[in-house]
Image (cartoon, rainbow, N blue to C red):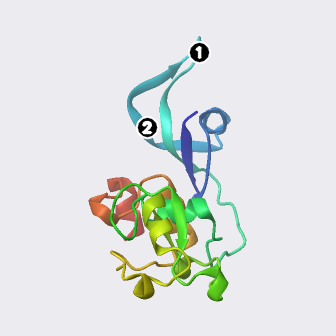
Amino acid sequence: MRETLVLNASFEPLSTVSLRRAVVLVMQDKAVVEQAHPGLRLRAAAVDIPVPQVIRLCRYVRVPFRQRAPWSRRGVLVRDRHRCAYCGRRATTVDHVVPRSHGGRDTWLNTVAACAADNHRKADRTPEQAGMRLLSQPFEPTPADALLLALGLGPSDGVKLPEWLAVRAA
């Protein structure tokens, strides 16, 4: 099922919802479609709306300020675009730069996406000890960045934000 990005009335990314939930919010006039899938429409007897890819709530929803994005294995893979930090091939595992046995923790700055072969080759060593070099340094995404990266809308790797979002975010 398609995922739809939900923006607050201030264009701040809030979460993702199922296509069904997004359509319900639009039909109840609680949200408007900001970006639709090109060429796709939902039709019924009295309804004809574009298939929403991004919706914006009509009323502002106050959310508690979250200063940090919660760490997760899936989040690390998404942040690194499923590319191995050592060789650039498809990554399926998460590697600890400083191994857990050496005091390394599950944090954004200590974990990178890695292919199984490089993860096995590095084993229980730091990259320097294993003679391996990181192609990119790990970083901690903001909560909004993590959400946009999960949807493939992030500004890195030449992916541009939609025009309507970039104008308001500037």
The structure residue drawn at horizontal position 37% and vertical position 78%, both measured from the top left corner, is 134
Residue type at tag 2: Ala
Residue type at tag 1: Ala
Quadrant in which residue 158 is drawn? bottom left
Residue ranking furthest to the top: 45
On screen, residue 110 above or below 8? below
The structure residue drawn at horizontal position 63% and vertical position 88%, both measured from the top left corner, is 102
Give the residue number, with chain letter if any, for mark 1.
46
Of 78 and 128, which appears nearest the observer?
128
Q: Are marks 1 and 2 in contact (CB under 8 Å)?
A: no
Q: Secondary structure at mark 2?
A: strand
Circle number at residue 36: 2
Of 16 and 109, which appears nearest the observer?
109
Q: Quadrant of the N terminus?
A: top right
On screen, residue 15 above or below 18? below
* Left or right side of 43 for 162: left
Q: Label 2: how many residues lie within 10 Å, few (<14), some (14-19) or many (20+)? A: some
Quadrant in which residue 66 is drawn? bottom right
The image shows residue 9 at horizontal and vertical percentages of 58, 58
Q: Label 1: how many residues lie within 10 Å, few (<14), some (14-19) or many (20+)? A: few
- Of badges 1 and 2, nearer the viewer stands 2
Q: Secondary structure at mark 1?
A: loop
Of 112 and 24, which appears nearest the observer?
112
Residue ranking furthest to the left: 158
Of 166 and 77, which appears nearest the observer?
77
* Left or right side of 52 for 46: right
Tell me how far mark 1 sits from mark 2, CA to CA. Answer: 19 Å
